Image (tube, rainbow, N blue to C red):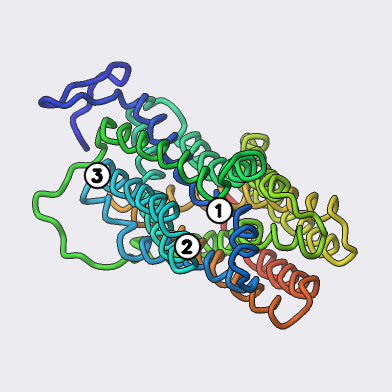
Amino acid sequence: MTTLTDPGEATVTGRRMRFAHGTGFWVIAAAFLITMAFSTVPTPLYALYQRRDGFPTFLITVIFAAYAVGVMASLYLAGHVSDWLGRRRVALLAVLAEVLAAVIFLLWSAVPGLLLARFICGVGVGVLTATATAHLSELRQIARPEEDGSRSALISSMVNLGGLAFGPLIGGLLAEYGTRPLERPYEVFLVLLLLSAVGIALVPETVERWETRPAYRPQRVALPADAKPLFFASAIGAFAAFAIFGLFTSLAPTFLAGVLHHSSRLLAGVVTFAVFVAGALSQAVFVRLTRRHQLRIGLAAMSLGLAGIAVGGLIPSLPLFVAGGVVAGAGVGLVFRAAVATAAQLADPGSRGEVLAALFLIAYAGLVIPVLLIGLGIALLPAEVALLIFSALILVLVNVAGVRMVRANTAG
């Protein structure tokens, strides 16, 4: 670890000004939140792109999948490199990748440009997700060594989900009431991302850069053999949870407009916002419960919510569809937090970034595979039937994974 100073004061290293570790914690949290919000800001805009260019609904899932593939590629290839290159440097590069994505959104809004921008956005998010989660944990440990480490995991998870929530809301508001709806959201976030980059450059480092770097290798799960069953049980649950989020960040606006006959861009943003906010708030509401009890509540909420989503699409009923999404989102928040906390607990400090990257790699696969399948299903079947099949499959996966997770956390 780096040489520590009084966490209540800013420090000067050489000629460079650095924030205190406590301040740095909130700077990284803010940058993490802004980046995650930027990753979902296009959600209510997809219908506008589709109307402008006339492409089929399945192409929306392909554009969304480009983002998720970027996340997975970066998690596999680079999500762990902050363990030896340093948290601050890697976080800064990740945010600068988001800046590049914002510029592409503004200058090249045709479908190929959207695909490229979403892929680069995913690359930056994949790198930052594991890096920021580990950085936040270490900054908090230095700033408040007496505090329970689970609090940092809670804040990190809430920032992650909170950012994902605010992106569609901001995008929907700017698209509904602002001018130039396909440009203004990216202009706003370009400024925020540049400010985030400046802030990250002033945050303290928490790992020593290796004098002799290890030979590069792609991602792996660096855990003892006896810890891997618990890790993979948590990762499967995260996969199922992210499949629900994938639905609401890619196709929910299409269902609202086509199946439920509500085409408001603001409504599309508000619905996705509500789902992610439920995920963030549920973690705070149930924080005092044991991990085992949180998992039970989370899995029950996900199951009930999936049923509401499916029935709401079949009837069709906007209130039931939205209520199902909110309940499912609350469950996702609890399951996701338990998965992150478990993975962080299993890892030693030298491999924490790598283990978290592996967890997020599997979780983000839940964004790609189910969403592509439901997009293909919409091309072949009525949207209501495709939604029902999706809900049924994720419901089964949630409960199969849930049994393993609850059993694995018997001591939680």
Q: Position of residue 16 (x, y in %)?
A: 16, 27
Kind of residue sitting beneath label 2: Leu
The residue lying at 70 percent from left, 72 percent from top is: 393
Q: Secondary structure at mark 3?
A: helix
Q: Earlier in the sequence, mark 1 or mark 3?
A: 1
Q: Is residue 72 left or right of residue 15?
A: right
Task: Tell me if label 2 and label 1 are in contact, CB under 8 Å.
Answer: yes
Q: Position of residue 27 (x, y in %)?
A: 38, 31
* CA neighbours of label 2 inside 10 A, class few (<14), some (14 to 19), many (20+): many
Kind of residue sitting beneath label 1: Pro
Q: Earlier in the sequence, mark 2 or mark 1?
A: 1
Indicate whether 212 appears above or below 220.
above
Q: Secondary structure at mark 1?
A: loop
Quadrant in which residue 355 is drawn: bottom left
What is the distance, in whole Å, between disc 3 and disc 2 at their CAs?
A: 27 Å
Residue picked out by circle 2:
114
Indicate whether 167 appears above or below 67.
above
What is the distance, in whole Å, between disc 1 and disc 3 at their CAs?
A: 27 Å
Q: Secondary structure at mark 2?
A: helix
Kind of residue sitting beneath label 3: Arg
* CA neighbours of label 1 inside 10 A, class few (<14), some (14 to 19), many (20+): many
Numbered mark located on residue 42 in the image: 1
Q: Position of residue 273 (x, y in %)?
A: 65, 44
Numbered mark located on residue 146 in the image: none
Numbered mark located on residue 89 in the image: 3
For marks 1 and 3, give the one nearer the viewer.
Answer: 1
